[in-house]
Image: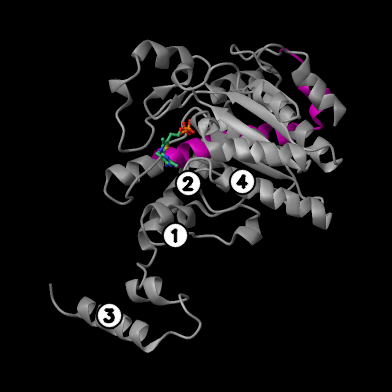
C-alpha cells in the first residue's frame, strides 16, 4: 500500500503519525484503510494486553509463575505490527511477545503455562502462524529468514515478521540472517523493538550508528519510526508486508520505544537507570496518546473507555483462573515420550527407574 508507506516517509527522522500529545502529524484515516471500529480495536487490544501483562507479573509475584518478562510501554509495537499483517502471515517472536500472541488469538492462560514450567510450547505454531518463543537472543531471526525463503520458493504468499530487541542486533545470528534475507530477497520484515536497554546495557554501549541504517549494508531499506505510535507501527508494517508480498524482499523497521518495566521479574532496573528517564518516557505512553486522539476524533467516549477497561479486567481474571486450573504435566511422559520411535531396552529401564523414583516417598 503505497499510501501507508507515505504516511511514515513524510515524518523524519523518527516517523510518527501521532505526536506525543495525541495530535496528528499525518492523516491516517485516508492512508491506513482502517474503519472506525478498526481504529478502536487497536486501542482495545493495547488495553487488553497491558492488563494481562500486569496480571502475569502479579501471578509471578504470588509464586504462580517462574518468571515474567513485562512488555509495559511496548504495546503499540505489539498491536500495530500484528494487526497490520494477514492472519496467514507468520510471526517469529522473542520471549517478550506475549501481546502479539494475544493479538493472534492464542489463549493467554495457555501461553502462561510455559512460564509456569508446565510445557515447553503450549500452542500449535501452524494453527496460529506464530512460532515458539525464542529465549536465546536472536536465534529466531535466522529461523524466520529460512522460513521466509521457503515461503518464496513455494510461492505461498506468506510474509514473515520477526521481532527482536536492540541488543539482538549485536548478535552474529542477526547479521547472518540479514545477509541471507537480502541476497535471497526473502519476504521478511525485521521489526526491531528498540527499547534502549538490553537488560542493563544501554543502546550506546553496544550500538554505534542507527539500527535502521544497517539494512542498507544488506541491500534493502530500513526505516526508523516512533514505536510508541500504534498508527506509525501499523503503517510501516503494512507497507513492508505489501512490499514483501510483491516480491521486493525484506525491510527493516526500527521502532523506537521504551521498556517501562524491569527486564524480567528477576531484574531491578533502579540499579542502572534513573527515575527521570522513566518519567520522560511515561509522557510518551502509547495508550494514553492514542486514547486522546480517539476521543478528540469522536471515535471513543468515556463509556467506551470504561467498557474496554471492564473487558480487559475480565480477560485477565479468566486468564488467572484458567492458569491455576491447568494440569501439571506427567514428568515421565514429558521427558521420555517422543525421544525414540522404538525405545531401546536401556532407555525403557531408565524410564521405569525414573517413574518408580517419583513414586517413592522423599
Ligand atoms: C544467546 C543469549 N545470550 C544472552 C542471553 C541473556 N539475555 C537475555 S535477554 C538479553 C538482552 C536482550 O536485549 P534486547 O535484544 O534489547 O531485547 P529486550 O530484552 O530489551 O526486549 C540477554 C543478554 C540470552 N538469552 N541468549
Give the number of the disc on residue 142.
Answer: 4
Give the number of the disc on residue 282.
Answer: none
Q: Would you place residue 218 above or below residue 140 in this image?
A: above
Count neighbours of disc 3 (C-alpha within 10 A) and say few if under 14, some if 14 to 19, many if 20 or more.
some
Q: Position of residue 137 (x, y in %)?
A: 48, 41
Q: Give the quadrant of the N terminus.
A: top right
For label 3, the SS is helix
From the viewer's perspective, is the residue at label 4 or at label 3 nearer?
4
Q: Earlier in the sequence, mark 4 or mark 1?
A: 1
Give the number of the disc on residue 120.
Answer: 1
- The residue shown at (48%, 54%) is 111
Residue at which label 2 appears: 314
The image quadrant that residue 114 belongs to is bottom left
Q: Position of residue 355 (x, y in %)?
A: 27, 80
From the viewer's perspective, is the residue at label 3 or at label 2 nearer?
3
Q: Which residues are magenta?
A: 25-54
Judge: label 4 CB < 8 Å from ligand 1: no
Between the residue at mark 2 and the residue at mark 4, the CA separation in whole angstroms equals 38 Å
- Residue 335 is left or right of residue 222, and the answer is left
Q: Earlier in the sequence, mark 3 or mark 2?
A: 2
For label 1, the SS is loop
Q: Position of residue 258 (x, y in %)?
A: 49, 23
- Between residues 78 and 315, which one lies in front from this camera angle? 78
Residue at which label 3 appears: 355
**What secondary structure prevails in the magenta region?**
helix
Task: Find out whether residue 35 is within the magenta segment.
Answer: yes
- Between residues 186 and 13, which one lies in front from this camera angle? 186
The image quadrant that residue 330 belongs to is bottom left
From the viewer's perspective, is the residue at label 2 or at label 1 nearer?
1
- Residue 248 is left or right of residue 24, and the answer is right
Between the residue at mark 1 and the residue at mark 3, the CA separation in whole angstroms equals 20 Å
For label 2, the SS is helix
Amino acid at each position: 500500500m503505497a499510501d501507508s508507506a507515505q504516511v511514515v516517509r513524510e515524518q523524519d527522522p523518527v516517523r510518527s503519525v501521532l505526536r506525543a500529545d495525541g495530535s496528528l502529524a499525518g492523516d491516517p484515516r485516508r492512508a491506513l484503510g482502517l474503519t472506525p471500529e478498526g481504529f478502536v480495536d487497536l486501542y482495545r487490544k493495547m488495553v487488553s494486553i497491558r492488563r494481562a501483562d500486569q496480571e502475569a507479573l502479579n501471578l509471578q509475584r504470588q509464586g504462580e509463575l517462574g518468571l515474567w518478562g513485562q512488555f509495559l510501554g511496548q504495546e503499540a509495537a505489539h498491536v500495530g505490527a500484528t494487526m497490520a499483517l494477514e492472519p496467514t502471515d507468520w510471526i517469529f517472536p522473542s520471549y517478550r511477545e506475549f501481546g502479539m500472541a494475544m493479538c493472534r488469538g492464542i489463549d493467554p492462560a495457555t501461553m502462561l503455562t510455559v512460564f509456569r514450567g508446565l510445557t515447553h510450547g503450549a500452542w500449535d505454531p501452524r494453527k496460529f502462524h506464530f512460532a515458539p518463543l525464542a529465549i536465546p537472543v536472536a536465534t529466531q531471526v535466522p529461523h524466520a529468514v529460512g522460513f521466509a525463503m521457503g515461503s518464496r520458493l513455494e510461492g505461498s504468499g506468506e510474509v514473515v515478521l520477526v521481532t527482536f530487541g536492540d541488543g539482538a542486533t549485536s548478535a552474529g545470528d542477526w547479521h547472518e540472517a540479514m545477509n541471507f534475507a537480502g541476497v535471497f530477497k526473502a519476504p521478511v520484515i525485521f521489526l526491531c523493538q528498540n527499547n534502549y536497554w538490553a537488560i542493563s546495557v544501554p543502546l550506546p554501549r553496544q550500538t554505534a550508528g542507527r539500527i535502521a541504517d544497517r539494512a542498507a549494508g544488506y541491500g534493502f531499506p530500513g526505516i526508523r519510526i516512533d514505536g510508541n505510535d500504534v498508527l506509525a507501527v501499523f503503517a510501516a508494517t503494512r507497507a513492508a508486508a505489501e512490499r514483501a508480498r510483491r516480491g521486493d524482499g525484506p525491510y527493516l523497521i526500527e521502532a523506537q520505544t521504551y521498556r517501562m518495566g524491569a527486564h524480567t521479574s528477576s531484574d531491578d532496573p533502579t540499579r542502572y537507570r534513573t527515575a527521570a528517564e522513566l518519567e520522560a518516557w511515561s509522557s510518551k505512553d502509547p495508550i494514553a496518546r492514542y486514547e486522546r486522539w480517539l476521543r478528540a476524533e469522536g471515535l471513543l467516549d468515556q463509556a467506551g473507555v470504561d467498557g474496554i477497561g471492564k473487558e480487559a479486567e475480565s480477560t485477565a481474571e479468566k486468564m488467572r483462573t484458567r492458569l491455576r486450573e491447568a494440569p501439571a504435566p506427567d514428568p515421565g511422559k514429558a521427558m521420555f515420550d517422543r525421544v525414540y520411535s522404538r525405545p531401546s531396552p536401556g532407555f525403557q529401564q531408565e524410564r521405569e527407574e525414573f517413574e518408580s523414583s517419583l513414586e517413592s516417598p522423599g
